[in-house]
Amino acid sequence: MPGIKDIARAANVSLSAVSKAINGKPDISEATRERILKIAEEMDYHPSAFGRSLKNMRSENIGVIIRRDLQPLSGNPFYSRVLEGIEGELAINSYSLVLHLLPKQQDGRLPKMLREKKVDGVILVGPMENSFVGDIIKSGLPAVVVDPRHPSGDVTQVLIDNERGAYLATQHLIDHGHKKIGFISDELNRDSFIKRFSGFSNALKDNGIVLDKSFVRTAGHEQGSEHMKALLDALEIPTAILFANDLNALSGCAVIKDMGLSIPDDMSVVGFDDIFLSTMSSPSLTTVRVYKEEMGSIAVRNILKSLKDGIVDSSTTIVPVKLIERGSVSTLTPS
Amino acid sequence: MPGIKDIARAANVSLSAVSKAINGKPDISEATRERILKIAEEMDYHPSAFGRSLKNMRSENIGVIIRRDLQPLSGNPFYSRVLEGIEGELAINSYSLVLHLLPKQQDGRLPKMLREKKVDGVILVGPMENSFVGDIIKSGLPAVVVDPRHPSGDVTQVLIDNERGAYLATQHLIDHGHKKIGFISDELNRDSFIKRFSGFSNALKDNGIVLDKSFVRTAGHEQGSEHMKALLDALEIPTAILFANDLNALSGCAVIKDMGLSIPDDMSVVGFDDIFLSTMSSPSLTTVRVYKEEMGSIAVRNILKSLKDGIVDSSTTIVPVKLIERGSVSTLTPS
DNA sequence: CTGTTAGCGCTTTCAG
DNA sequence: CTGAAAGCGCTAACAG
């Protein structure tokens, strides 16, 4: 594995000449540059990150932090998608991605990759303890928060337009003649929940429909299916349900079908997120699409920009959503 | 952000004293060590990876490479699980995970994180071009291959006991009275496919059942559901099917149900992998469990060991599998 | 036990 | 345009 010295010797030039040639710096003649480059190529030389990082004080690594207990990789396709978006955009900019899953029990210290400056910046995806996020922001390391809004105004954020998404979905149901509409959510984090619920209730209000509290089942960590059962067991049941995310919706659908009801004939269903599974279910799920990869790449662009400019802007990007009509909503014919 | 110099100055000792104290080296009195440690703590000092890496020529990072087009994060829960296992084991050993998704079109060069020595070793998960793996092995960087066997004997491998898993599954079906058993596989990589298929046919052979070629549908990149339809459209159809993985099995099940057949009454089904979804489907899927996280952590332990010992052993670990009986297999009553 | 010193591989002044 | 030299933060060999 050749070092810069080997190239310099082979090309009969100084170390600095090689450095300049490799890094496309001026102050070197085209002729020498090409000669050096050719030799470097032949010897398969690549500047080691060790020396370069130390000198530049930049690792060209970006950290990504997600709570482990969210099963962000295997369990929830939402995070995976964001992560894929992040990876792709980082790769384009030839940065590397250092992945850290936050253990449930933290020791109060920042993760090693941050403490030891193995990364130039960090992207925080998904819900996370506020104090933890606060510590990171205070540490001064460039950071971007993806998805649930962090209360501090001191950090760049990339957020879903939760409110509008829920509004759109609800309006869609109303447009199809539904008036008795339920809302089910379980383990969604607080901020997103509030936004989605408020989009839901605003849509009802704007259409002059009064919200039936008994149609709203929320919070708690039981599978969304518990909520669903409870809802179906009630005296009066809605004709349509908005779920706070697709995973909930899908397990809710299973319950509905188990009860012998048909989707969408007996019950219309709308989800939120548009995960891959939603196209696979039968019927396929009408849902609110969230541009997950896009959110990831926006986060990366933001962080790279602030690295380049050396400033920590605290802008917030709200990524738009889109209603995707599939097969789980039917038009309610007035009886 | 204090450096080692700041600590040395504050503690009135030399740089090396601080270094020794921090790294728990001998040749330093307990008294001074504690004093230094206390000051370091107070000043929130953490040795920067920049200097340390350069000096030690070790980054304490491990790279993980997976083909991007496998959608290893969002699409295939198998890889995600392995990845979670890797991350966990790395974290325990305070290594960081650098994730690289291999683009479809490669440029023939090794990924930047390898070229520039940003990682001390690399774990290759899932199918990958042989020449690519070969290049990495040749580069001398410690590497571990997870899952599909690489033909070269020069690399540490962690493999699934594919053959035994398929054998177990097939035997299970036979034990339940099935004789007409189909085998469906689509985009599985070649090596795993061969192993699983051979386990399947060996089990048949050992039970004196002759394999009906028309019951075997394989290869091609259509969704496994195409195979399933073709199989069900045939004159004679099997009473049970072994799918080469759960994802295939699940989409196969959807087809079966769409055709108005019941699982397991009209058709028994066994999968392979035991992904989370398999517990969720109805009926839940009988399948062959693969210890994915375990494979990930074994891979890590292997690579860390060879890093420590400075040797590249080329051992192969075959991780056992286990048949998980759930609801998709019924006993065939002789008619 | 402690401190001085050299040097890891690279970039960058700065003098020629 | 070129090269010599300093130094990024840290560790280790060695001298005291």
Image: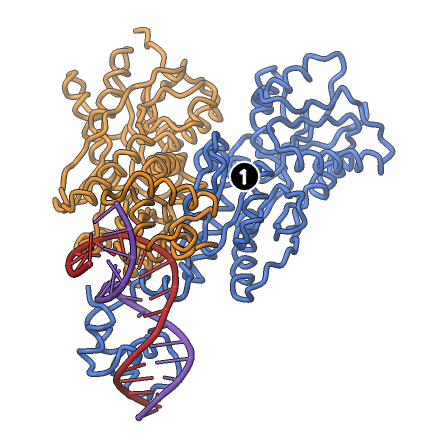
Chain colours: A orange, B blue, C red, D purple
Image quadrant holding the C terminus of chain A, namely top left
Q: Is residue B70 left or right of residue A101?
A: right
Q: Is residue B20 left or right of residue A190?
A: right
Q: Quadrant of residue A308?
A: top left
Q: Please state the total of marks drawn on the protein image.
A: 1
Q: Position of residue A317 (x, y in %)?
A: 19, 33
Q: Which residue is mark 1?
A: B275
- Pick whichever, A199 or B142, lies toward us: B142
Up the image or down, A122 lies above or below B101; here it is: below
- Pick whichever, B280 or B223, lies toward us: B223
Q: Quadrant of residue A151?
A: top left
Q: Position of residue A228 (x, y in %)?
A: 38, 31
Q: Position of residue A76 (x, y in %)?
A: 40, 38
> Residue at (78%, 32%) from the top-left corner?
B177
> Residue at (78%, 33%) from the top-left corner?
B201
For mark 1, give the secondary structure. loop
> What chain does mark 1 sit on?
B
Q: Position of residue A212 (x, y in %)?
A: 23, 26
Up the image or down, A93 lies above or below B260; here it is: below
